[in-house]
Image (cartoon, grey):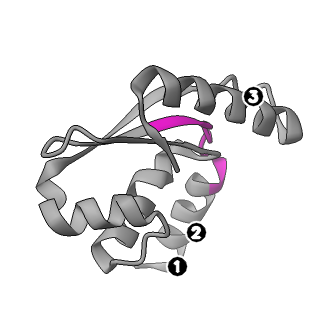
Amino acid sequence: MPKEARKAAVNAYKERTVEAGIYAIRCAATGETWVGGAPDLSTIGNRLWFTLRLGTNPHRALQDAWNRHGAEAFAFEIVERLDEEASGYVRDRVMREHLTRWAERLRATRI
């Protein structure tokens, strides 16, 4: 990649809008659901799938289900985007509250 193109790509990445929020992972084979919160929803899906494919995901029940049923049994969805005005500890507190609510609503395991 030419130096100028690389520089433009790095700048575009730095200037992108980062959205925090709550996501769900569903296993169609078992009906299980896991919910989590992320400060950057645009990257969390790839991160989760990467660790699951490598077998290094820290959430044992999720990793075990992935190992048993394979990637095709799983779906990732964003269930809520948080207000971007909240930052720092306020965003963290709001995310914890919303995560608890979504876990109860979906009868899901928090991750």
Horizontal side of residue 48 vs 21, given as left or right: left
Of label 3 and label 2, which has the lower sequence position? 2
Give the residues in magenta: 14-23
Mark 2, residues whose alpha carbon is within 10 Å: few (<14), some, or many (≥20)?
A: few
Q: CA distance from mark 2 to mark 1?
A: 6 Å
- The residue sitting at 78% across, 25% down in the picture is 85
Q: Are marks 2 and 1 in contact (CB under 8 Å)?
A: yes
**In the picture, residue 86 is in which quadrant?**
top right
What is the spatial separation of the Cα atoms under label 3 and label 2, in whole angstroms? 35 Å
Helix or strand or loop: what does disc 2 sit on? helix
Instruction: Tell me the mark number nearer the camera, choosing from 3 and 2.
Output: 3
Side (left or right) of 71 relative to 10: left
Q: Which residue is disc 3 drawn over? A: 94
Residue type at mark 3 is Val
Q: CA distance from mark 3 to mark 1?
A: 41 Å
Which residue is at a point 61% across and 30% down the rendered structure image? 100
Residue of label 1: 3
Q: Is residue 43 above or below residue 97?
A: below
Residue carrying label 2? 7
